[in-house]
Image (cartoon, rainbow, N blue to C red):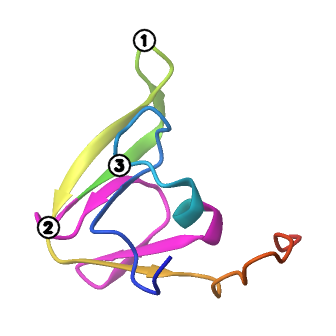
Amino acid sequence: MTDTPPDRLCTDPRSPFHDADALERGVGVRVKGVEKTNVEEYCVSEGWVRLAAGNARDRFGNPMTIKLKGPVEPYFRGPRRQEGSPPAEG
């Protein structure tokens, strides 16, 4: 895994853009310079994020989302794990 987050990432395990390793490491996202903590999916190259809209759910139990457009800056919150080392507790 590189030190650059993926161009597109989704928290839904059914999505083709789901990356469990990146999500386990922790990815933070800034949109228009503002830190967002409720990001469900983002795409840097297309310049959008999908944010969970409160506690609202659709009929399948998935979070309702809104789409914001603007400059997207993802970053890793934690350091990269070394090969063979156990996951960090916390």
Q: Look at mark 3 in the image and give the residue it sits on.
A: 17
- Label 3 vs 1, first from the N-terminus: 3
Assess disc 1: are there few (<14), some (14-19) or many (≥20) residues with their C-alpha within 10 Å of its C-alpha: few
Percent coordinates x, y for residue 57 in the rendering: 46, 25
Residue at 46% across, 27% down: 62
On the rendered image, what quadrant is the C terminus found in? bottom right
Q: Look at mark 1 in the image and give the residue it sits on.
A: 59
Secondary structure state at the residue bearing disc 3 = loop
Percent coordinates x, y for residue 70 in the rendering: 14, 71
Secondary structure state at the residue bearing disc 2 = loop
Q: Please state which of residues 70 and 27 is positioned toward the viewer in this rendering.
A: 27
Is the residue 68 above or below the residue 62 in the image? below
Percent coordinates x, y for residue 31 in the rendering: 28, 74
Q: Look at mark 2 in the image and give the residue it sits on.
A: 47
Q: Quadrant of residue 86?
A: bottom right
Q: Which residues are magenta?
A: 24-48
Q: Residue at the far front: name it.
A: 84
Assess disc 3: are there few (<14), some (14-19) or many (≥20) residues with their C-alpha within 10 Å of its C-alpha: some
Tell me the kind of residue under disc 2.
Gly
* Eye-nearest disc, 3 or 1: 3
Tell me the kind of residue under disc 3.
Phe
Magenta stretch: residue 25 in it? yes
Left or right of 41 in this view: 77: right
Distance, label 1 to label 2, CA atoms, is 28 Å
Percent coordinates x, y for residue 4 in the rendering: 39, 83
Assess disc 2: are there few (<14), some (14-19) or many (≥20) residues with their C-alpha within 10 Å of its C-alpha: some
Secondary structure state at the residue bearing disc 1 = loop
- Label 1 vs 2, first from the N-terminus: 2
Tell me the kind of residue under disc 1.
Arg
Mark seen at residue 44: none
Q: Quadrant of residue 63?
A: top left
